[in-house]
Image: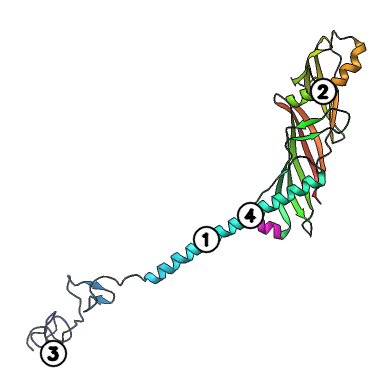
Amino acid sequence: MAGGTGPGGYGVPGTAGQGYPGADGINGGATHPIGPPPSDAPAYPGGYAQEGHGGGRPPAPRRRRRGLRNTVITLVVLGGLFVAADRLAVNFAESQAADKIKSAEGLTIDPEVSIKGFPFLTQALGKELDEVEVNLDGLTTDGGNGQPIRLTELRAVLHQVRIGGDFSSATADRATGRAHISYADLSAAAGDGITVSYAEKNAQGNSRVKFSGNFMGFSLTAYGTVTVVEGNTIRLHLDQMPEGIPQRYESTVRGRTDQQWRISDLPEGIKLQDVESTPDGVDISVAGNSVHLVG
C-alpha cells in the first residue's frame, strides 16, 4: 500500500492524506489517532484535548466548596451562641447563690460567688459543680467579748459541690480558704492610742503581734500572741505586762489588748484552722468537710 497515515493512527500504511490533524479520513471525517499524541498536544484526562474542551483539567465544583464554607460558618455561630448562653446562665446562678448566702447567714455585705469550670450548663444538669469560690471580703464581726473586727479578706473555695434536687441548697465535699485581718483593723479594735503591728514568732513558734503607744500617760511596748480557739474564734492575748506600768493597771491594760472575735458568719462546716502573723497582717487558714452552702 502507499505510504502515509491510515485510519488506525500514525505510521500505519493506509490512504494517503490521512494525517493529523484535519486531514480527510475515513468517511470524510477528521481522524482521531490511536497512537501517542504529538508532543505539543494539550493534555486532557484520558487523552489530549478534544474539540470544544480546550486544554487543562475541568474547573473544581464551586457549589461543594460554598456548601462546606457555609457549614463551618454555621458551626462557629452556633458555638458562639452556646458560649454566650452558658455565660448568661452562670452569671444568673452566681447572683442567685450570692443572694441565698446573704439571706441564710444574715450578712450585711454582698457576697461574691464565682462558679468555675466550663461548660456550666452541663454541670448544672448533672447537679454537681467542680469548684465554687465564695468571697466575703469586708465582713465585720463582733461575736464574743471583743470589739468589732473587720476581715479585710475572707475567701473559701468549695470543691465538688452537689446541688439539691430543687436547686435551693448545695453541699461541698470539702472547702479550703483564708481570711486576712490588717493591722489597721487590729489597731482600730484596740482603741485610740494603741497601735498593733507585726512581731516575730516566740520561742514556741506561736505567731505574735506588737502593741505600742501611750496608755494612761504611760509609754506602752508589749507583745501578744494570736491563736485560733474552738475553730471559730480568733484570740489576741497580751503575753505579759509591759515594764513601767504598775500592776494595778493590768486589768485596764488587758481590757484594751486582750481581744477575741468569734467568726460566726461562715458557711456551716467551715472552721478556722491556723493563724500566722505576717508583715501585712494576720492570716487565718480555713477548711472544712461537708460544707453546707445555701438553703
> What quarter of the picture does the N terminus occupy?
bottom left
Three-letter amino acid code at the position of disc 2:
Thr
Among numbered discs 4 and 2, the one appearing first in the sequence: 4
Residue 38 quadrant: bottom left
Dot 4, crowdedness within 10 Å: few (<14), some or many (≥20)? few
Among numbered discs 3 and 2, the one appearing first in the sequence: 3
Q: Position of residue 12 (x, y in %)?
A: 14, 84
Inter-mark Cα distance, 4 to 2: 48 Å
| 10, above or below 200, in the image | below
Between 259 and 238, the residue placed more toward the observer is 259
Measuring 68% from the left and 53% from the top, which residue is drawn there? Answer: 92
Among numbered discs 4 and 1, the one appearing first in the sequence: 1
Residue tagged 1: 77
- As helix, strand or loop, the secondary structure at mark 1 comes to helix
| 169, above or below 107, in the image | below
The range drawn in magenta is 120-125
Among numbered discs 3 and 4, the one appearing first in the sequence: 3
| Left or right, 86 with reference to 231 | left
Measuring 78% from the left and 30% from the top, which residue is drawn there? Answer: 275
Measuring 90% from the left and 13% from the top, which residue is drawn there? Answer: 249
Q: Position of residue 153 (x, y in %)?
A: 72, 35
Residue tagged 3: 28
Residue tagged 2: 225
| Circles 4 and 2: CB atoms closer than 8 Å | no
Three-letter amino acid code at the position of disc 4:
Leu
Among numbered discs 1 and 3, the one appearing first in the sequence: 3
Dot 3, crowdedness within 10 Å: few (<14), some or many (≥20)? few
